[in-house]
Amino acid sequence: MIGRVILIVLDGVGVGEMPDAAAYGDAGSHTLAHVAEAVGGLKVPNLEALGLGHIGDFAGVRRMGNPDACFGKMGALSKGKDTTTGHWEIAGIVKDDPFPTYPAGFPPDVIQAFQATIGRRVLGNRPASGTEIINELGEEHLRTGSPIVYTSGDSVFQIAVHEGVISVEELYRMCRAARKLLKPPHQVARVIARPFIGEPGTFVRTELRRDFSVEPQGRTLLDELRSCGLPVVAVGKIEDLFSGRGISRAIRTAHNAAGMDETVRSLKTLPRGLVFVNLVDFDMLYGHRNDAIGFARALEEFDAWLPEVIGVMQPHDLLCLTADHGNDPTTPSTDHSREYVPLLAYGPRLTRGVNLGTRRSFSDLGQTIADALGAKRLACGESFLDALLPG
């Protein structure tokens, strides 16, 4: 009955702390509720109509009597709270051991090996906000040519260079070298290229960021869909998060506006299969910068776009909205937060208003999509497809 699925991940839009949040330093986090409160109420009438108000109490969001979508929230079984882990779990891989993090920076043997490989010394090597460390060390980088290496509360090895000092192509080569060096026990989830331009005091990161992720450790929803001949279109950084595996067409986008445009464009030409979208602005531009007002504005812009994507849906389509973790911009931390994620499932001919409850794992969504599109059952997850089908 379902021939096409649109899966949109609102990166960082959590809906409340999980029971183990305190172990991650995230007690009290509630991204969506705190963002709504910070701006005196969200104006998201289209998400409201789908049933967002049934997932939790969010200032400005009403609980509609007859929501258009089925609704619920999902918890993570995987250990960790990073982007790679969240997307992998949605696609059916539950990671029992978390990717390593480095609150004191990377150990000397890792940095020394990296410096020997690239033939340059590095600056930084500590957890930091990307914009702050570029402003702090950018001038020294211009003078010495040494790349800036930093991390965060997430499992990332980030390399920042000025495009006028080190070319983007050379930066990517450095990232590939780091990816090859970072083996267990230092196998971070992502090596991230962070190019920037400008003069001291006015440095700006460019849109040529790239993520070099670990290859998925098992078969994913994307692999199974491709195995049965279904196309998988990846919009945003999906290709990077899955190392290109199981993807028939990848469309890189740097911001939400481009991601939303490419989603609609893809739906106008793709007759069947999966369109898998990551919208990153919530997390990258606002969550990590503790900008609740910007976060709210991005949510309202997404909401205003929703009628456009719904307008190009076919009768037998399924639209799924979710997230990969939280990133509460109202807490002192600038890192991801261990939270439940929203779940909204809508189709023109599907059941409406069903409470899908609190799902045990993100992988329930991946299993449902595999079930809906006739792919092989995934290793993890319980399908809720029956709740979506009428009659």
Image: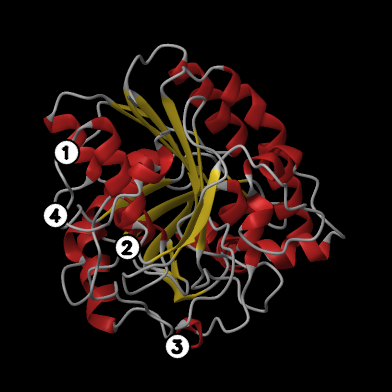
- Which of the two discs, 3 and 2, labels the residue nearer the N terminus? 3
Q: Nearer the viewer, mark 1 or mark 3?
A: 1
Cα–Cα span, label 3 and label 2: 38 Å
The answer to whether marks 1 and 2 mark residues whose Cβ atoms lie closer than 8 Å is: no
**Which quarter of the figure has residue 283?**
bottom right
Identify the amino acid type marked 2. Arg
Q: Nearer the viewer, mark 1 or mark 2?
A: 1
Q: Residue at x 16, y 38 (%)?
A: 224
Identify the amino acid type marked 3. Ala
Q: Which mark is residue 120?
A: 2
Cα–Cα span, label 1 and label 3: 34 Å
Q: Tell which of 220 and 144 is nearer to you.
A: 220
- Which of the two discs, 4 and 1, labels the residue nearer the N terminus? 4
Residue named by callout 3? 23
Element at badge 4? loop
Q: Residue at x 72, y 47 (%)?
A: 64
329 is higher (above) or lower (below) than 167: below
Cα–Cα span, label 4 and label 1: 11 Å
Q: Is residue 130 left or right of residue 54?
A: left
Residue named by callout 4? 218
Residue named by callout 1? 224
Quarter holding the N terminus?
top left
- Which of the two discs, 1 and 3, labels the residue nearer the N terminus? 3
Q: Tell which of 283 and 195 is nearer to you.
A: 283
- Which of the two discs, 3 and 4, labels the residue nearer the N terminus? 3
Identify the amino acid type marked 1. Glu
Q: Position of residue 254 (x, y in %)?
A: 52, 38
Identify the amino acid type marked 4. Gly
Q: Is disc 4 surrounded by few (<14), some (14 to 19) or many (20+) residues within 10 Å? A: few
Q: Is residue 244 visible?
A: no
